[in-house]
Amino acid sequence: MGRTLIRGGTVVSSTGRSEADVLIDGEKIVAVFAPGSAIFGFDVAASADTVIDATGKYVIPGGIDAHTHMELPFGGTAASDTFETGTRAAAWGGTTTIIDFAVQSYGQRVFDGLATWHDKAAGNCAIDYGFHQIIGDLNTDSLQAMDGLLAEGVSSFKLFMAYPGVFYSDDAQILRAMQKSAETGLMTMMHAENGPAIDVLVGQLLAEGKTDPYYHGIARAWQLEEEATHRAIMLADLTGAPLYVVHVSAKQAVAQLAAARSRGKNVFGETCPQYLYLSLEENLGAPGFEGAKWVCSTPLRSRAEGHQEELWQSLRTNELQLVSTDHCPFCMKGQKDLGLGDFSKIPNGIGSVEHRLDLLYQGVVEGRITLERWVELTSTTPARMFGLYGTKGVIQPGADADVVLYDPAGHTSIGLGKTHHMNMDHSAWEGYEIDGHVDTVLSRGKVIVDGNSYLGAKGDGRYLPRGLSQYLI
Ligand code: DUC
Ligand code: ZN
Ligand code: ZN
């Protein structure tokens, strides 16, 4: 691979921006320095094998999507992106690391679930990847297994307060797992929705003939997200477990997280692009069965109630700390259409892994977040939160050369036949226009995206063992 010099760009970090050149040797960044300068009399440009002109571009650390579900079995089918197709799409969009969720299914042992995920990913990924562990069957054996997760490079586990009969944990199980989390330092990640209450509402709506996708959003009311978020916070408070609430969509849940954080608790939250942009009325409420495209959980919220604006605000104030996608794609034909006539049978999930950087950058263009906050939300904080910082999430000597050249003068049109490399027959983001463009992507020093060319290969990506979170007080 030799030496690569990225010259003439604006390097943006979570703390500032400056005109700087970046020297890469093999897979690592070795120097970040004033443009064009010699280092100790050494002519850097002359020593480089490759020079990339970054004039007019932002030079940022590769995106880290801390919440994806490649190949996730769900609702009698499986998420349509494989590790191969999903990570390639991620790379096109400037994401150079994903953290996917290994699944322990009901009746399965934790390490068998983890081994299955290693088998799915190994040799197939375009970019580097790590795993969180879903604990889908929280019994004594699982609790014991959790003692060994960190040694496997898995420093976080996810529980579900939703989906009774599938992945669900009750309060007693959550308490036991959180005690383990406090003891080991593993981050407890929580899907916070009151599943048993949702199931009652689902049954009642269906009995009334309310079967359209829109009612998915009605059954999964914000009160049931707020209640579960509050309950999870209280159990974390009691046990001392660090808590990270995934895919927050209700402004009331944000308020619960903010209150806990203001009490000095190790409580964190993420949201996803769909909750910032899309809504119950316009998307889930689209005519006919169209709304199925946007069935995900937690659900899209009402714009009239102002959730989207509050979420953007919470990203400014650090009440929410990062933006992941919860990438969980399903095709309309043969997958989402399993729920024709019964919204509860629509597989839950939206595909966005390719578009997170662009969609968040549009927030920079619109004055909602700063350029630096964009980098922090999409790369630096995910690295710190999930034990990858230093190697990932930053442009500095010693870090992996995962670098994106982002062109603020470029343009991205999202949709089928335009920008779309995910394995889906539709785009949840059809018609979105972004005032910016991912121009060049390097993964550990290798150029994998160069303008409109994909230069990466299946198997480029490596497993990333992770350490404990560096975000805890
Ligand atoms: N939510 C989704 O939308 N899909 C997968 C699982 C989840 O919790
Ligand atoms: Zn979830
Ligand atoms: Zn998820």
Image (tube, rainbow, N blue to C red):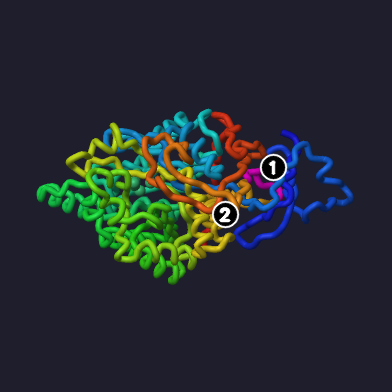
Q: Position of residue 312 (x, y in %)?
A: 44, 63
Name the mark on residue 380: 2
Residue drawn at (65%, 51%), measured in percent from left and top? 57
Tag 2 secondary structure: helix
Relative to 85, does residue 373 appear above or below in the rendering?
below
Answer with left or right where residue 97 lies relative to residue 312.
right
Amino acid type, label 2 = Thr
Q: Which residues are magenta?
A: 397-403
Amino acid type, label 1 = Lys
Nearer the observer, 277 or 60: 277
Answer with left or right where residue 158 lies relative to residue 347.
right
Residue 242 quadrant: bottom left
Residue 26 quadrant: top right
Label 1, label 2: how many angstroms apart (C-alpha)? 17 Å
Nearer the observer, 450 or 111: 450
Q: Position of residue 93 (x, y in %)?
A: 52, 43
Label 1 residue near ligand 3, CB within 8 Å: no
Residue drawn at (57%, 54%), measured in percent from left and top? 380
Label 2 residue near ligand 3, CB within 8 Å: no
Residue drawn at (31%, 37%), measured in percent from left and top? 332
Dominant secondary structure, magenta: loop
Residue drawn at (28%, 53%), measured in percent from left and top? 172
Query: Mark 2, residues whose alpha carbon is within 10 Å: few (<14), some, or many (≥20)?
Result: many
Nearer the observer, 218 or 68: 218
Q: Position of residue 304 (x, y in %)?
A: 30, 65
Q: Quadrant of the N terminus?
A: top right
Question: Furthest-left residue in view?
Answer: 208
Q: Earlier in the sequence, mark 1 or mark 2?
A: 1
Name the mark on residue 28: 1
